[in-house]
């Protein structure tokens, strides 16, 4: 097995987070941030915007990274079933209101932290902590967002493109 890259697409508005009820494992039937695998050749920011659009109809752009973490799922005997490196990506709230459940979602809606605290079993593990980060004033990580593309025989260009520059 290999490690797979995935994203969570996070939109916040007026103290609430845009969440989907997951149709498929992992976390089937639980509310969580829209997201999924990064496709081959796709940047993680492109993946975040695409997953958000596919699962909620929300059309916008990704702003940058909130955090990243490993999700390692093991079976009852301790063998790894899958391992994802997940990047939580803050997406721009442009006021889009035409949201509807898409391909991997049963439902979509806006939730605040009080709703998550009141019924934690209805939400993906870690959503409270990640939601708290998303709603905080910390903002996105200030590192370069330009993709690093390497071609044999060429010296890679050094780009320092950042959302902060």
Image (cartoon, rainbow, N blue to C red):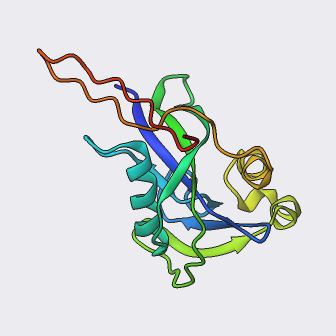
Question: Is residue 123 shown above or below 125?
Answer: below
Q: Residue at x 38, y 52 (%)?
A: 46
Q: Is residue 147 above or below residue 30?
A: above
- Number of callouts in the render? 0
User: Which image quarter: residue 66?
Assistant: top right
Foreground: 17 or 105?
Answer: 17
Asked if residue 153 lies left or right of residue 101, the reply is: left
In the displayed structure, 73 sits above or below 125; it is above
Who's the residue at 49% across and 53% down the image? 25
| Percent of width and height locating residue 155 | 21, 16
* Drawn side of residue 41 relative to residue 58, left or right: left
**Picture quarter with the C terminus:** top right
Q: Quadrant of residue 113?
A: bottom right
| Residue 55: percent from left, percent from top | 46, 68
149 or 79: nearer the viewer: 149
Residue 101 x/y as whole percent? 49, 76
Estimate the x, y position of residue 123 in percent, counting from the top left. Answer: 70, 58
Q: Quadrant of the N terminus?
A: top left
Residue pictured at 35% horizontal, 26% vertical? 2
Q: Which residue is farthest front? A: 165
| 39 displayed left or right of 136 | left
In the image, taking residue 18 as reference, residue 154 lies left or right, namely left
Residue 14 found in image quarter? bottom right
Q: Residue at x 83, y 67 (%)?
A: 115
Q: Which residue extends farthest left?
A: 153
């Amino acid at each position: 097995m290999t490690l797979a890259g995935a994203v969570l697409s996070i939109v916040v508005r007026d103290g609430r987070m845009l969440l989907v009820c997951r149709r498929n494992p992992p976390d089937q039937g639980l509310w969580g941030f829209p997201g999924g695998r990064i496709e081959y050749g796709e940047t993680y920011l492109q993946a975040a915007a695409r997953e958000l659009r596919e699962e909620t109809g929300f059309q916008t752009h990704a702003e940058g990274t909130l955090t990243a973490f490993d999700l390692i799922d093991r079976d009852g005997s301790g063998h790894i079933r899958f391992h994802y490196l997940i990047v939580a990506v803050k997406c721009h709230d442009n006021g889009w209101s035409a949201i509807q459940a898409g391909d991997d979602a049963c439902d979509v809606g806006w939730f605040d932290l009080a709703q998550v605290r009141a019924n934690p079993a209805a939400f993906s593990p870690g959503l409270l902590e990640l939601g708290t980060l998303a709603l905080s004033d910390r903002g996105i990580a200030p590192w370069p967002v330009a993709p690093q593309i390497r071609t044999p025989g060429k010296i890679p260009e050094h780009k320092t493109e950042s959302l902060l520059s």
